Image: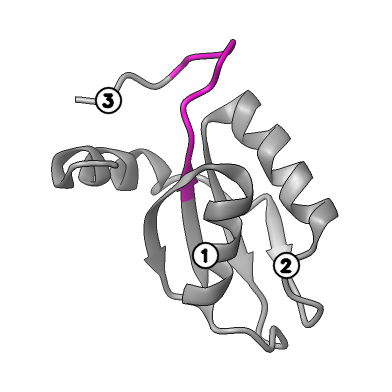
Amino acid sequence: MLTGKQKRFLRAEANQLKPIFQVGKDGVNENMVEQIGDALEKRELIKVSILQNCLEDKHTVAEKLSEGTGAEVAQIIGNNIVLYRESEENKQITLP
């Protein structure tokens, strides 16, 4: 689990990131979870955008992605979710 201080740090880091995945009307699927898992291994911190036509609630999408990838939800802001997972090989972010 992330502490409040760690979440604040990650939110600041994610501020300039652009979303690299979009969740549309089909919602979250296995393929998407796998790709997001791979992206987290490379980058550790990513943003996922939820499109207007997505039928699922953004909190439900965040929960599914978090469970599927083993990542922490650092923030849900507007229609964006910020996910963090420590990388096994490409450790770039040092949490406070």
Q: Is residue 4 above or below residue 63?
A: above
Q: Quadrant of the C terminus?
A: top left
Identify the residue at horizontal 55%, vertical 53% (top origin).
67
Q: Report the residue marked by disc 3.
A: 95
Q: Which residue is identified by label 1? A: 62
Q: Is residue 16 left or right of residue 9?
A: right
Q: Nearer the viewer, residue 8 or 28?
A: 28
Q: Gap between marks 3 and 1, in whole Å?
A: 21 Å
The residue positioned 29% from the left and 43% from the top of the image is 12
Q: CA distance from mark 3 to mark 2?
A: 28 Å
The type of residue carrying mark 1 is Ala
**Callout 2: helix, strand or loop?**
loop
In the figure, 73 relative to 22: above or below?
Answer: above
Q: Is residue 28 above or below residue 89?
A: below
**Residue 74 rendering spot, x and y as whole percentages:** 36, 51
Q: Earlier in the sequence, mark 3 or mark 2?
A: 2
Q: Nearer the viewer, residue 1 or 95?
A: 1
Above-or-below relation of 80 to 5: below
Tell me the crowding category of disc 3: few under 14, some 14 to 19, or many 20 or more residues within 10 angstroms, Cα based: few
The front one of 85 and 11 is: 85
The mark nearer the N terminus, 3 or 1, is 1
Q: Which residues are magenta?
A: 83-92
- Numbered mark located on residue 28 in the image: 2
